Image (tube, helix red, strand yellow):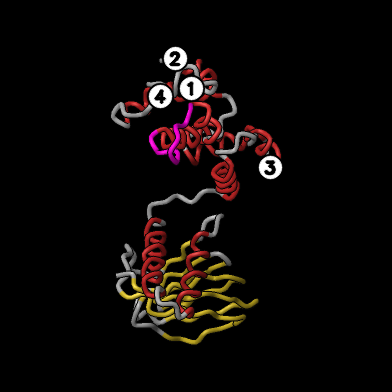
């Protein structure tokens, strides 16, 4: 299932004559654009698109300006499709990375290549299957999401500064993001930081004990008191109380005279 049987790469080309494959074919356009022709239909594609082609579906590929691609064949993939379809990669090009990795490992000759190709086959099929239920984000919202994900654990990250650097009005971006993501950009950023903090509170710190200040800074908060307030608001308990609860009351508490614990007095007041 989802096993990759062939990976190829096409340099600049303008046409591919009518042909078919016994297995499913996935064609990632790495450059240019064109049109796939099928019996009874046509599918236009651009750079960053994947054309999904079922087995034994005769097709052609033509372009006025030329195209390049990476094409993969998989037998019995886990997909909800029965007809040819075009799936667009996201702004982070994760699907392109998977195609490039599959191409590399197919020709690498390494002993682990077969196992890695199976993993990349699963990854590609999962992404393509998820496309069926996903609503595509507008490019600017996808860009905003990617920037937040890349920077949310940075205490120096200024979301407002980033939003105002974009060539759209601040209010428009805020409303558009909320419409497509269900929350405002600031709420999305806060939720990412709080989720990371919750994970840090219940994971080992390499032999030591993380203070509330440590957790706050590592998850992107420059003010531990503000972090504790926001954490309690979301989870209904202080960070320290959350750690004790999730770890069965086995979390060691630093000595009360520790210089670091004095920085956590705000958290103690909230408990």
Q: Main secondary structure of the magenta part?
A: loop
Q: Nearer the viewer, mark 4 or mark 3?
A: 4
Say if 127 sits above or below 69 in the image.
Answer: above
For marks 4 and 2, give the CA distance: 16 Å
**Circle nearer the N terminus (3, 1):** 3
Mark sitting earlier along the chain (4/1): 1
Q: Classify mark 3: helix, strand or loop.
A: loop
Query: Do labels 2 and 1 touch, CB within 8 Å?
Result: yes
Which residue lies under the disc numbered 3?
166
Q: Is residue 195 visible?
A: no
Task: Please give the residue where the numbered disc 1 appears in the rendered image.
Answer: 228
Name the quarter where the N terminus is drawn.
Answer: bottom left
Q: Are marks 4 and 2 in contact (CB under 8 Å)?
A: no
Residue under numbered circle 4:
253
Q: Residue at x 38, y 68 (%)?
A: 121
Q: Position of residue 209 (x, y in %)?
A: 44, 32
Which label's residue is closer to the chain start, 4 or 2? 4
Q: Crowding at label 3, few (<14), some or many (≥20) Cα neighbours within 10 Å?
A: few
Q: Residue at x 59, y 77 (%)?
A: 63
**For marks 3 and 2 on the same chain, the one whose residue lies earlier in the sequence:** 3
Which residues are the magenta region?
A: 202-211
Q: Which residue is pictured at 55% across the width and 55% down the height?
A: 92
Residue 260, horizontal then vertical, whole percent? 53, 23
The residue to which callout 2 is attached is: 270
CA–CA distance between discs 3 and 2? 39 Å
Which one is in front in this view, the residue at disc 4 or the one at disc 1?
A: 4
Dot 2 alpha-carbon crowd within 10 angstroms: few under 14, some 14 to 19, many 20 or more: some
* Other-residue count near label 1 (Cα within 10 Å), few / some / many at <14 / 14–19 / ≥20: many
Closer-to-camera residue (36/193): 193
Determine whether the residue tagged by mark 2 lies in a helix, strand or loop.
helix
Q: Position of residue 265 (x, y in %)?
A: 50, 15
């Amino acid at each position: 299932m989802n096993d990759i049987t062939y990976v190829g790469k096409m340099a600049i080309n303008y046409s591919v004559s009518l042909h078919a494959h016994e297995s499913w074919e996935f064609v990632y356009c790495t450059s240019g654009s064109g049109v796939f022709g099928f019996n009874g239909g046509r599918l236009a594609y651009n750079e960053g698109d994947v054309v999904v082609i079922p087995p034994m579906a005769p097709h052609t590929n033509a372009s006025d300006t030329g195209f390049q691609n990476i094409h993969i064949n998989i037998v019995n993939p886990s997909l909800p499709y029965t007809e040819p379809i075009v799936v667009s990669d996201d702004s982070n090009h994760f699907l392109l990375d998977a195609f490039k990795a599959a191409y590399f490992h197919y020709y690498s000759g390494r002993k682990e290549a077969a196992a890695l190709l199976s993993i990349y086959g699963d990854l590609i099929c999962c992404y393509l299957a998820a496309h069926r239920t996903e609503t595509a984000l507008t490019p600017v919202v996808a860009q905003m999401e990617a920037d937040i994900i890349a920077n949310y654990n940075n205490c120096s990250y200024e979301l407002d500064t980033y939003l105002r650097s974009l060539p759209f009005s601040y209010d428009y971006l805020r409303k558009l993001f909320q419409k497509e993501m269900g929350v405002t950009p600031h709420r999305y950023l806060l939720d990412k930081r709080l989720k990371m903090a919750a994970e840090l509170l219940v994971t080992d710190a390499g032999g030591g004990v993380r203070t509330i200040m440590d957790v706050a800074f590592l998850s992107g908060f420059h003010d531990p008191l503000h972090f504790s307030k926001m954490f309690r608001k979301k989870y209904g308990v202080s960070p320290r109380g959350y750690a004790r609860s999730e770890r069965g009351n086995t979390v060691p508490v630093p000595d009360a005279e520790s210089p670091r614990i004095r920085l956590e007095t705000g958290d103690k007041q909230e408990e």
